[in-house]
Image: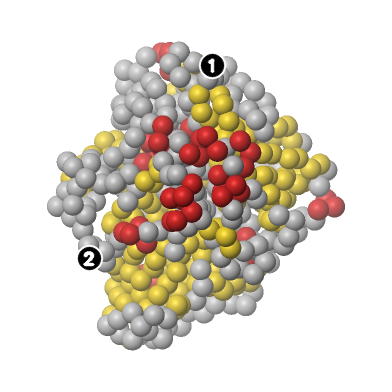
């Protein structure tokens, strides 16, 4: 079993069986995740769960053209703000060639339509719920007032849903275990979400965030992109237009009749949350989708491209590498992180990306022979999951794009000495309500409990420690990574982030400032199965 990088050299390192499987009392739950210790060590992959195997014939790699999500047009642009409308509805979509797959969608598509907006120009999105279950929308990475942040009990109820919808189960709570949230805000059929977007330009994404059922909702299709731009970024001369590609990477599995396979205890997502025991550590699929297409190919110019990469998988980690037909590895020049541009470019040959992380990367095809191919592979995959997508270089062109040596000068400069407090949080497996769960500080999520109270404007240092792999996401705020295992951050930790990947037995320090808005927010693991099974906590900014 290997981790993506050594802390100092950037090279792969090995971990012991005890480190991989016995940390923090997680052994029992990890073993239930579908792989024995010997199998995990033999595969040398990050331990994030168990893989489903599709029962339908799968297409060969690099045959399906890469689709690009449509850009949603606003219904109005009056009063200095843009208004959009999105209907959440069931749709049947062709994902595998010749196979029809039922999905839950935003506007009938997977991914949902992309919203493009300008920094500081407010956006209101009216979401109408025509699905058979309640939903919640979270703009991941958005600096959003609490009432529009998508708190997991602020449900939009579909037509005919019973009034008792405020009674929710907690993940792995078992039959009859229910919790009430006295602060929940319920609306029927539709809700307006307002996003001020007074934030750095970045790739954000929106997805369902319903308590206990986030994982199956995202798996069934409820995810889309939201790009924030500004004039300063536009002036840099980065690749743009048709040479700027959003890439939403996600894994899925399919039943024999073409439906999405998912090991839910309640396939209707109405009452009982959770997954079957072999998948408690996370659900992995055996089909890699990019923008909803299996192992696609894109016909590219011999020029620079800007790749806006999102890992929208429930639990799968990737380590991306670009390889030419003749075996050369191309540089992946990182220019941005979750929360926007870096101060200066960082060059990688291998780029690890955990669930919910985003990387803004430049790749240059100008030295690739026309007619040849560049494969993007996942060094952490095996078999079919080792391939991600390919670029076929089709033509020589003139390229006037550039990568400036200075990308941004507006990154926060918080110092450790600015922190008014230091907090410690453990992310570990444990028992909850008589079953398996995933806990923060030894506690499962309770919407009625206040876990952390921070003063508005306070700078804090958080020390996070993990038993197995946990991508930790903070709502509302961005943060900087200060250290890993007491050593300097890794190259891919650069910039302002909102999700950080913790590896087995690893401690990571982050620093942030709690500004923007007051109210109730969340921090949680973005392994979606872990999140649904209790690995979430409340953050009150006062």
Marks 1, 2: nearer the viewer: 2
Q: Is residue 344 visible?
A: yes
Give the quarter of the figure containing the C terminus: top right
Closer to the chain start, of discs 1 and 2, is: 2
Q: Which residue is mark 1?
A: 180
Query: Which one is nearer the viewer's eye here, 436 or 299?
Result: 436
SS of the residue under disc 2: loop
Q: Which residue is mark 2?
A: 63
By what rule are the colours in the image chosen? secondary structure
Where does the image place residue 394, in percent across and percent down from the top left? 28, 80
Task: Give the residue drawn at x 39%, y 55%.
Answer: 249
Q: Residue lying at the far front in this picture: please name it.
A: 38
Q: Which mark is residue 262?
A: none
Image height of 316 relative to 244, above or below: above
Horizontally, residue 256 falls left or right of residue 443, namely: left
Q: CA distance from mark 1 to mark 2?
A: 49 Å
Image height of 172 relative to 345, above or below: above
Task: Give the residue drawn at x 62%, y 60%.
Answer: 493
Where does the image place residue 70, in percent across and percent down from the top left? 32, 55
């Amino acid at each position: 079993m290997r981790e993506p990088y050594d802390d100092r050299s950037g090279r792969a390192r090995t971990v012991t069986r005890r480190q991989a499987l016995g940390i923090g009392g997680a052994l029992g739950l990890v073993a239930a995740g579908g792989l024995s210790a010997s199998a995990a060590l033999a595969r040398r992959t990050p331990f994030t769960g168990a893989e489903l195997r599709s029962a339908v014939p799968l297409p060969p790699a690099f045959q399906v053209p890469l689709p690009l999500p449509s850009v949603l047009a606003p219904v109005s642009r009056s009063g200095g703000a843009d208004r959009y409308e999105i209907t959440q509805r069931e749709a049947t979509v062709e994902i595998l060639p010749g196979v029809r797959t039922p999905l839950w969608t935003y506007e009938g598509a997977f991914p949902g339509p992309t919203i493009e907006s300008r920094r500081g120009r407010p956006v209101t999105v009216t979401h109408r719920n025509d699905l058979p279950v309640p939903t919640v929308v979270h703009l991941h990475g958005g600096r959003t007032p609490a009432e529009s942040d998508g708190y997991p009990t602020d449900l939009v109820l579909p037509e005919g849903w019973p009034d008792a919808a405020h009674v929710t189960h907690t993940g792995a709570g078992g039959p009859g275990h229910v919790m009430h949230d006295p602060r929940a805000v319920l609306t029927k059929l539709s809700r307006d979400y307002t996003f001020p977007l007074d934030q750095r330009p970045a790739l954000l994404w929106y997805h369902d965030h319903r308590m206990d059922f986030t994982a199956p909702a995202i798996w069934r299709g409820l995810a889309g992109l939201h790009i924030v731009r500004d004039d300063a970024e536009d002036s840099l001369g980065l690749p743009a237009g048709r040479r700027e590609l959003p890439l939403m990477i996600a894994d899925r599995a399919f039943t024999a009749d073409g439906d999405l396979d998912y090991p839910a205890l309640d396939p209707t997502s109405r009452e009982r949350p959770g997954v079957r025991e072999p998948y408690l550590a996370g659900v992995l699929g055996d089909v890699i989708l990019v923008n909803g297409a299996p192992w696609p190919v894109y016909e590219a110019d011999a020029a620079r491209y800007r790749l806006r990469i999102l890992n929208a998988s429930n639990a799968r980690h990737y380590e991306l590498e670009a390889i030419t037909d003749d075996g050369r590895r191309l540089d992946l020049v990182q220019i941005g992180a979750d929360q926007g541009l870096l101060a200066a470019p960082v060059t990688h040959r291998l780029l690890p990306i955990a669930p919910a992380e985003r990387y803004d990367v430049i790749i240059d095809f100008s030295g690739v022979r026309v007619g040849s191919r560049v494969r993007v592979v996942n060094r952490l995959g095996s078999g079919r999951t080792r391939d991600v997508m390919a670029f076929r270089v089709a033509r020589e062109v003139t390229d006037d794009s550039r990568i400036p040596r200075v990308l941004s000068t507006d990154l926060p400069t918080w110092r450790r000495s600015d922190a008014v407090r230091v907090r410690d949080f453990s992310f570990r497996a444990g028992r909850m309500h008589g079953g398996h769960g995933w806990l923060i500080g030894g506690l499962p999520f309770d919407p009625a409990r206040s876990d952390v109270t921070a003063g508005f404007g306070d700078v804090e240092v958080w020390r996070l420690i993990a038993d197995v792999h946990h991508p930790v996401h903070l709502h509302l705020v961005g943060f900087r990574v200060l250290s890993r295992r007491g050593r300097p951050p890794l190259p891919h930790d650069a910039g302002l982030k909102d999700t950080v990947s913790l590896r087995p037995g690893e401690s990571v320090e982050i620093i942030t400032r709690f500004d923007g808005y007051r109210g109730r927010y969340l921090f949680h693991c973005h392994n979606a199965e872990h999140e649904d099974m209790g690995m979430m906590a409340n953050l009150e900014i006062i």
